[in-house]
Image: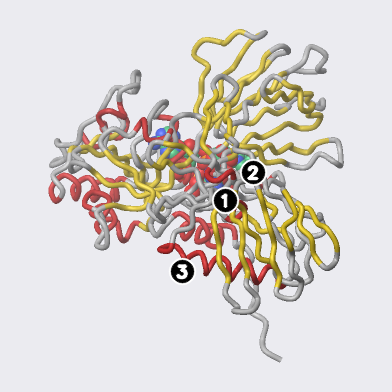
Amino acid sequence: MHFNRQLKRLEIQPVSGEISIGGTWGSEVVHANTKSGLVETESSNGVFSAKNQAQENKNLAAANEKRMNGTSYASSSLNVNGFVEGERYSMTETKVATLDGSSDGHVTSNSFSKIQKSNGNASSYSSDDELVSIEGNMCASATGVVRVQSRKKAEMFLVRTDGFSCAREKVTESSLAFTHPSTQQQMLMWKSTPKTVLLLKKLGPELMKEAKEVASFLYYQEKMNVLVEPEVHDIFARIPGFGFVQTFYTQDTSDLHERVDFVACLGGDGVILHASNLFRGAVPPVVSFNLGSLGFLTSHTFEDYRQDLKQVIHGNNTAEGVYITLRMRLRCEIFRNGKAVPGKIFDVLNEVVVDRGSNPYLSKIECYEHDRLITKVQGDGVIVATPTGSTAYSTAAGGSMVHPNVPCMLFTPICPHSLSFRPVILPDSARLELKIPDDARSNAWVSFDGKRRQQLSRGHSVRISMSQHPLPTVNKCDQTGDWFHSLIRCLNWNERMDQKAL
Ligand SMILES: NC(=O)c1ccc[n+]([C@@H]2O[C@H](COP(=O)([O-])OP(=O)(O)OC[C@H]3O[C@@H](n4cnc5c(N)ncnc54)[C@H](O)[C@@H]3O)[C@@H](O)[C@H]2O)c1
Ligand SMILES: Nc1ncnc2c1ncn2[C@@H]1O[C@H](COP(=O)(O)OP(=O)(O)OP(=O)(O)O)[C@@H](O)[C@H]1O
C-alpha cells in the first residue's frame, strides 16, 4: 500500500475481510430444470466442478429468484482492489447482462429454459416448449426460430493510469468486480517495542501538570525516552527530577520521524495540527488526549492516559495492536509564473484556503485540475480540504462532512457570487492548481491549516495534490466509532429529542 512506505518500524494491516476474487455471475451460463426444480450452473469456460455445486446451486437459486422476479440484469458482487498471487484485479463495479428471458431477444421462452453451450453451438430446452437445435445458434421452438447467443464474452483487461504510467490488471472471467471495499480498518502492530515518544502540549505554560504526569509515567513505568519541544524543555529543565526529559533542534526536524516512535499530544485540535506541521514528511502515529475545548480529533480522555498509552505501546487485550486512522494530507506548493518558489511546500492536515484577505474586491481564482481549467472562483475564496478538514472550515462554508477513510479532497467555495456554485468532492488522484489570473482586481491570500498565511500576487498559484505522507492517529474505539462520537460530542450531529410512541 502506498501509505506504508513511510512507516519503518511498524506494520499496518487491513483488519477485516480476506481477499477473494468474486464476480463470476455475469459469465455463468445458467441451467434451470423446471420439472425437477433443480438448478444447475456451468461456468463460461465450460468446466463444471462437482465440488463447487453446492455453492453454485446457492448462486443459482439467487439467480433463479431474479429470473422469477423478471429481472433482466444481475449485478456483479461488490468488490476489490486486491492482490492475489501477484496479480491485480479490477476495482470497478459493473452490471452484467445474464442469459435469461429478457427482452433483448437472446433467449425467448415463457418458462425457464435449459441452455447448453458447447463449441459455439447452443440449444435450449423447455419443459413445455421443446426446442430443437437447427444449426449454429439457431433453435426452433413452438413459437418460431430464435437466435441463441453462444459466443463467449470477449476477454478484457483493465488499464489504470495516473497520467504518467499504466498498469494492466487482469479481469477475472471477463467480469469487473470488487472483492472487498477499498478502505478498511487499519491496525498498528509494532515489530519491536517502541522506545521514544515525542510529548507535545498546547503552547504556553498551561498543561504543565499533565505533561509532568505523562512524562514520568512514560519514563519510569514504560522505560521510554521522552522528547519535548525546546520551549517546553526550558520549563522542564527548571523542575527537579525531570532531567530525563530530552529535546531536539527545531531548525532541522527533517529526521525527527526517524527518531520518534509515536507522538502523544495534550491539548485540542490545534496541537494535532501543530504535530502535522512539525513533520513535513513521514509522521509517526499520534495519540491525542483532549485537554482543549472542542477536540474533534482528540479521541482520548486524559483520565485514561495510563491505560491508553499502555495499549499503544503493547497492544490491547484482544490483539497485539491498536486501530489507527491514516489521515490523508495535502501537499501544497506555491508557484510564481509556473516556477516553484523555493521553500514554499506545505503538507496540510485540514485544508489550504485561498481567499481575498482584507481586500474589498471579489477574489478571482482560476482552478485547474490536471492542467485543465475547471472553473473560476469569484467570491471570497475557495477551500481545498482533506476528509479530516471536512469537519472544520469546509463544513462552515457548506461542504459535506466526509469520513476520514474516504480517499478524496473537498473543493468548497467561500461565499461564491453564483447561486449554482455548490461544493464538490474530488478523488484523491486530483491535481489542483489555484491561480491568481493577471486580470484579477486584487491579490489573494493563502493559508495552510489556518496558519502560515501569505500573499499570492497575480501570476502566483498553489498546486495541490495528495501527500504521500498521511498522519496516523490512534483510535480510541475504531475509525467509524470515533468519528461519529466526535460528530455528536462536538457538533451535536442530529441531536434531537426522541419522539414518543402514539
Ligand atoms: N469559519 C470557520 O469555521 C473557520 C475559520 C477559520 C479557520 N477555521 C479552522 O481552524 C483550523 C485551525 O485550527 P486552530 O486550532 O489552529 O485555530 P483556532 O484556534 O481558530 O480553532 C479553530 C477551531 O476549529 C476546530 N477544528 C480544527 N480542526 C478541526 C477539525 N478537523 N474538525 C473539527 N474541528 C476542528 C478547533 O477545535 C477549534 O475549535 C483551520 O484549519 C480551519 O479549519 C475555521
Ligand atoms: N505546541 C504548540 N506550538 C505552537 N502552537 C501550538 C502548539 N499547540 C497548539 N498550538 C496552536 O495553538 C492554538 C490552540 O491550540 P489548541 O490545542 O488549544 O487547539 P484549539 O484550536 O483551541 O482546539 P480546541 O477547540 O479543540 O481546544 C492552535 O492554533 C494551535 O495551532
The one nearer the camera, 255 or 174, is 174
In the rendered view of the protein, which quadrant contains the C terminus?
A: bottom right
- The answer to whether marks 1 and 2 mark residues whose Cβ atoms lie closer than 8 Å is yes
Q: Is residue 144 above or below residue 173?
A: below
Secondary structure under tag 1 reads loop
Secondary structure under tag 3 reads helix
Sequence-first disc among 1 and 2 = 1
The residue wearing badge 3 is 54
The residue wearing badge 2 is 153
**Residue at 28% across / 32% down in the picture?**
8
In the rendered view of the protein, which quadrant contains the N terminus?
A: top left
Specify the quadrant of the image occupied by residue 111.
bottom right
Residue 44's tag is 1
Where does the image place residue 299, in percent across and percent down from the top left?
Answer: 42, 54
Other-residue count near label 3 (Cα within 10 Å), few / some / many at <14 / 14–19 / ≥20: few
Other-residue count near label 1 (Cα within 10 Å), few / some / many at <14 / 14–19 / ≥20: many
Query: Left or right: 409 with respect to 251?
Result: right
Q: CA distance from mark 1 to mark 2?
A: 8 Å
Other-residue count near label 2 (Cα within 10 Å), few / some / many at <14 / 14–19 / ≥20: few
- The answer to whether marks 3 and 2 mark residues whose Cβ atoms lie closer than 8 Å is no
Specify the quadrant of the image occupied by residue 129.
bottom right
Q: Does ligand 1 reach within 8 Å of label 2's beta carbon?
A: no
**Residue at 67% across / 54% down in the picture?**
122
